[in-house]
Amino acid sequence: MDLSFGNEYKVFREEVRSFIEQYKDKQPTQVALRGEESLAWQKLLIEHGYHSRTIPKEYGGYGAEADIIKSRIIAEEFSTAQMNTGLGGQGISMLTPVLLEMGSSEQKQQFIKPTIHGEMVWCQGYSEPGAGSDLASLTTKAELDGDEWVINGQKIWTSSAHVADCIFCLVRTEPEAPKHQGISFLLFRMDTPGIEIRPLIDMTGNHNFNEVFFTDVRVPKQQIVGKRGQGWLVANAILGHERGSLAPPDAAETRLNGVIDLMQTETIAGEKLIDNPVYRDRLVKLQGRAMAMRFNDMRLLSARINKNQDVKLAGMIVKLMSTELRHEIEGLAIDVMGETGLSFEDNPYLRGNGSWQYQYMFFLGLIIGGGTSQIQKNIISERGLDMPKEPKVTK
Amino acid sequence: MEFGLSQEQILLQDSVGKFLNDQVPLDKVRQIASGESSDAEVWQGLADLGIPSLLIAEEQGGVGLGSLDAVVIAECLGYHVTPSPFISSAVMAPIALMAAGRQDALAAIASGRHRVGIAFGEAIGARNDAGVVVDGTVLSGKCLFVLDADADAYLIATPEKNLYLIAADAKGVERNNLTTVDKTRTTCELILNNATSELVSDDPEVYLRTLDAGRVMQAADTLGAAQCMLDQAVAYAKQREQFNRVIASFQAVKHMCAEMVANLEPCRSMVWYAGHALDEVPEEARLIACHSKAHLSEVGKFVAKTATEVHGGMGFTDLVGLHYWFKRIGANRQLLGAPELVREEAARIQGLAV
Ligand SMILES: Cc1cc2nc3c(=O)[nH]c(=O)nc-3n(C[C@H](O)[C@H](O)[C@H](O)COP(=O)(O)OP(=O)(O)OC[C@H]3O[C@@H](n4cnc5c(N)ncnc54)[C@H](O)[C@@H]3O)c2cc1C
C-alpha cells in the first residue's frame, strides 16, 4: 500500500493550487449552456490544461500526455476548493472519447474542438419506445441513398435534444444481420429537415428529455463512426465512459457533509436533528457505505496505474452501487427534515435551494438511465461471476 | 501510488491459505467445533509460520510486520473459518503489551505457547451482571464473552480504559466456558474475586489502539468468511439443477449473487485501507476502524443470509457446513461492539454525538 503520489507530483499540485488561488474569484458561479461567461471560463480551463487535458492540440485540447495521477490531482484540488470544473454533458464526456478512439481524422477535426469548447452541444439518441434495456433491438432505420443516409424512426428519453446542435444516434442499417451486428453510429445536426422534437416533462417537473421523430432525415454518408454494422461496439465504448462517472465518491461525501450541516442546524421540538440517535445512526451507516466506495475508487485508480492489479469486479459494481447510494443520501436529508423536506419550487421553507428533493429524484433517474440496476446485476453475474445467460425466448 | 496488497502480502496470503487448506480443512474445523479436539494444534501450526509474532517488533523478538499484513491473515482465517485465537493473541494482546514494553510476555506469545485472551466487553459496555471493580490492582466482578476460553492469561479493560493483565490460574479467578453459536472460536466468563492483576496500561490511547486493531481484524475475518460463502453459493448455483436448468441461470439467483458481490467488493478496499491506516494514518485510524467494523457487520449479515438461501435446504443443513461461516460472521458482528454501538462511537469521534 503506497498512497503517496510521489515527489514529482508535489510541484504539480502546487501549480494547480496557485491557479485556483488566482482564479477562484473570477470563476462563473453557474454553468450556463452557451453563456458567454461559461464559454470564456471553459476556454481558460482548456488553455491551462484543467479541462480536455489529454486531447491533442490539433483538436482544440491542451495536448498533455495522459497522466492519471495529474488528472486526479486536478480533480481533487478543484473539488476541495469547490471550483467550477467547466462544461460536461454527453458530447464532452461520451462522444469525444469515442471520436478519439474510433472517429475518422475528418470527424475529429470537425467535431472535437467545438464540442469541448461548448460551442457544439450534443444529445444521445439510443433509446426507443421499443428498445430500452434491450437496446440492440432498436428499429430506427437508415438506408443509403446515393451519398446520403435516409433516416426514419423514433427516439425517446433523449436528454437535451431540445437544446442540442447535434445528435449521435444509433440506427439500423443492416436489417438482415443479427441484431447486434446491424447497427450503425451516425452523427448529424438537429436542424436537419425531417427532425421533430417533442418535450417530455420528467418527474422533477423539468423539461430535460424528449421524444425525437425522424422522417426522411438525410445525412451525409461519411458521418458514420466506425464501419457499417459496428455501431454496437462504438456505443458500448461510450457506455463504459458513462457508467464509471455518474456518481463519483467525492460528490457522495460532499453531499453527506451537507446532510450533517442540515442535521446540525435544523431542529425538531427544539432538539437538533443530529441529537436524534435514529437519524444519526442512518447518517453514519451511509458514511460507512460512502467510505467503502471511496476506497473502491482508489483501488480502481491504482489499477489504471499498476496494470497487474485485477479489479474487474470492483469496476463492474460501481454504477449500481454509487447511484443507489446517492439516492439514499439525498433521501436521508428529506427524511430528517420530515414535512419540511417536502418543500418544492417557491415554498419559502425550501432548504438547499430544493436540491435534496431534486437530487433524490435525479438519482433515481440515473439508477434507471444508462443501464438499469437490474441490467447491472445481469452484467455482474454473467460477465463478472460467469453465471449462464437467461435462456433465449424465440418469438 | 499503489492501492492494494504488495507482492509479499500476496505471498503471505498464499502460504497461509495453503496451510489452512491442507492442515485445517472443514473436517478439522468440525472436530474442533464439536469439542473432539482443541485448536492448540492449529495454533502451533500457525506459530510455526510466525503468525503470533507477526506484529511484534523485531527488536522485541517478533517478525515486525504491519497491521495490513495482519488483515491479510485475518481474511484467510475467516475464509477458512479457522479455529484460532488470532485476534486476541496475535493482534490485540501484542499491541497492548508492546506499548507496555512487556518483553517476557511477548516472547512467550511469539512462541505460540502462551495465549492471552481479551476481556474488553465491560469497557465497551457491560451487560447485565457484568462489570469490574478495581481496587489498586485487585479486581473483582465479572467479565462476559471474553475471547479465548483456553488462554493462559487475560487482558482486562475497565471503563476507565485501563488495561490489566491477569493469569488464568491466578487466585480469585474462576473461568467458565460460554457456548456461543460460533463454535469455531471460544469465549468464557471470568469471575473475579479479589484477584491480583498487573496494570499494563493506564493510557486510554493504548486501549483504543488495541480495540481499533481488534475491530479491523474482525472486519477482515468477516470479509474472508463472506467471500467464501459467496464463492460457495456461486459454485453451488452452477451445478444444482431444477426445472431442467442450473439454478445459476435463474435471474433471481443471479441477482442475489450480484448483490453479494456488489456489496462485498468495496469492503475489500475498505478493510485494506483500515489496516493501512492503523499504522500509517493514525489521525484517521479510529474512525475508519469503527466504520469498517460496522459496515462489514452489515454486509456480512446480508451475505451470510443470501448465500445460505442460494443453497436452498442444503444451506440449512449441517451437511455442507455453511452454517459455520454464517455463525462466524454473526459472532464478529456482536463481539467488541455491535454495529449500532460502533456507529455511535464513529459519531462521537466526529463530534456528532456526546
Ligand atoms: C434521466 C434519464 C435520462 C436518459 N437519457 C437518455 C438519453 O439521453 N439518451 C438515450 O438514448 N436514453 C436515455 N435514457 C433512457 C435510458 O437509457 C433507458 O430508460 C434505460 O436504458 C431503460 O430502458 P426503458 O426505459 O425502456 O426501461 P425497460 O427496459 O422497459 O425496463 C423496465 C424495467 O424492466 C427491467 N428489465 C428490463 N429488461 C430486463 C432484464 N433483461 N432483466 C431484468 N430486468 C429487466 C428494468 O430493469 C426495469 O426495471 C434516459 C433515461 C433516464 C431515466
Image (cartoon, coloured by chain):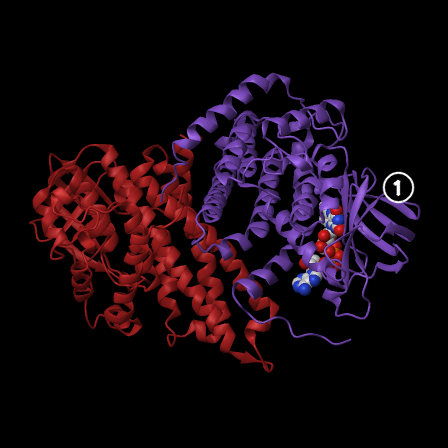
Chain colours: A purple, B red
Is residue B161 at all visible to an observer of this figure?
Answer: no
> Which residue is painted at 37% across and 48% down in the image?
B272
Q: Which residue is mark 1?
A: A191
> Which residue is painted at 37% across and 60% down in the image?
B225
A178 shown above or below A189: below
Q: Quadrant of residue B11?
A: bottom left
Which percent across, then down, holds residue A178? 75, 70
Q: Is mark 1 within 8 Å of ligand 1?
A: no
> Which residue is painted at 11% across and 34% down in the image?
B136
Which percent across, then down, holds residue A138? 79, 61
Which percent across, then down, holds residue B216? 33, 47
Q: Quadrant of residue A1?
A: top left
Is residue A299 at all visible to an observer of this figure?
Answer: yes
Which percent across, then down, holds residue A195? 90, 47
> Which residue is painted at 61% across and 16% down in the image?
A25
> Which amino acid, mark 1?
Asp
**Image quadrant occupied by the C terminus of chain A:** bottom right
Disc 1 residue crowd, few under 14, some 14–19, many 20+, Cα 10 Å: few
Q: Quick check: A326 left or right of A207?
A: left
A352 shown above or below A233: above
Q: In front here: A347 or B91?
A: B91
* Chain ID at mark 1: A
Q: Quick check: A259 left or right of A61?
A: left
